Amino acid sequence: MSPGTDAVFTADSFGVSFRGRQILKSATAWTRAGSVTAVLGRNGCGKTTLIRAALGLGRRDFGIVHFADRTWDRPRLSALARRGLFYLPDRGLLSWRRTVDWHFRAMGPITNSQIDRAAIEGLEIEQFRSRKAKTMSGGERRRAELALALTRQPICLIADEPLAEVSPRDRVLVSNAIRRLAAKGCAILVTGHEVDDLLNLADLVVWMVGGTTHWLGTPEEARTHVQFRMDYLSSTRTYPGSGGDTAC
């Protein structure tokens, strides 16, 4: 299945090698306005590698990005961000020595009313806005990071493992916030290992295996895909979000 003309963001046919090892052979992922695409695959299969290469943060042998009605043969995150993309990495977005409010101010001229409406509602960050990131739990940091994304009102959100290493309650808050953002028309691409949570969150599913990607369709179609069930789902039912099989 091809991305089609309605895809807001497409990382198209990426190849990445490192020290003689072919990490990605021809990997493609895309997402549409108002939908959440989940990229699933075992640890080490290249999900983060694809995202970083597509955003100009990592090496690539080949591959192009389609975003904001243009083609980027040399994508750079700063340029993509100016066109409405927000990247939520798997860790490290917040400075550990700064407060949550400091991060809001550092992002530019955002009024308190915008922060209250777009970020605090539903993510419940009011109680720790004055705290430094190093004093917060992993779930609190994730909620604050997503709040920062929401204040920018992006047209595309790329979130690498947004549900990793957070409590079940925090997963619900983060998932609900992502769904609200999609409902406003944002195109969202997420990765992770929280299989059931991500299948419940997503509208569309991409399976990464063997250095390439397979478009599985809806979560319902993914659950009934025989090879996906045998090769991936059967090995992740006791896999809460980190560690596990690193084979591809």
Image: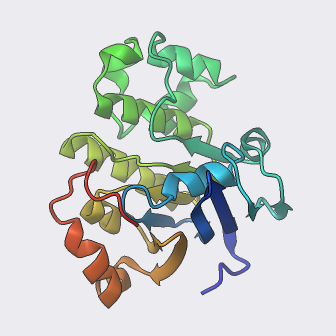
Between 102 and 139, the residue placed more toward the observer is 139
Q: Which residue is drawn at 43% across and 52% down?
A: 178
Q: Residue at x 62, y 57 (%)?
A: 20
196 left or right of 119? left
Q: Which residue is drawn at 77% across and 41% down?
A: 82
Specify whether residue 14 is in view: yes
Q: Residue at x 32, y 57 (%)?
A: 193
Between 184 and 158, the residue placed more toward the observer is 158
Residue farthest to the left?
A: 238
Q: In which quarter of the image is the C terminus?
A: bottom left
Q: In this view, does 173 lie above or below 205?
A: above
Q: In this view, does 240 lie above or below 212?
A: above
Between 71 and 187, the residue placed more toward the observer is 71
Snapshot colouring: rainbow
- Residue 129: x and y in percent read 40, 18
- When asked about the image quadrant of residue 198, the answer is bottom left
Specify whether residue 33 is in view: no
Between 10 and 99, the residue placed more toward the observer is 10
Residue farthest to the front?
A: 20
- Residue 232: x and y in percent read 30, 73
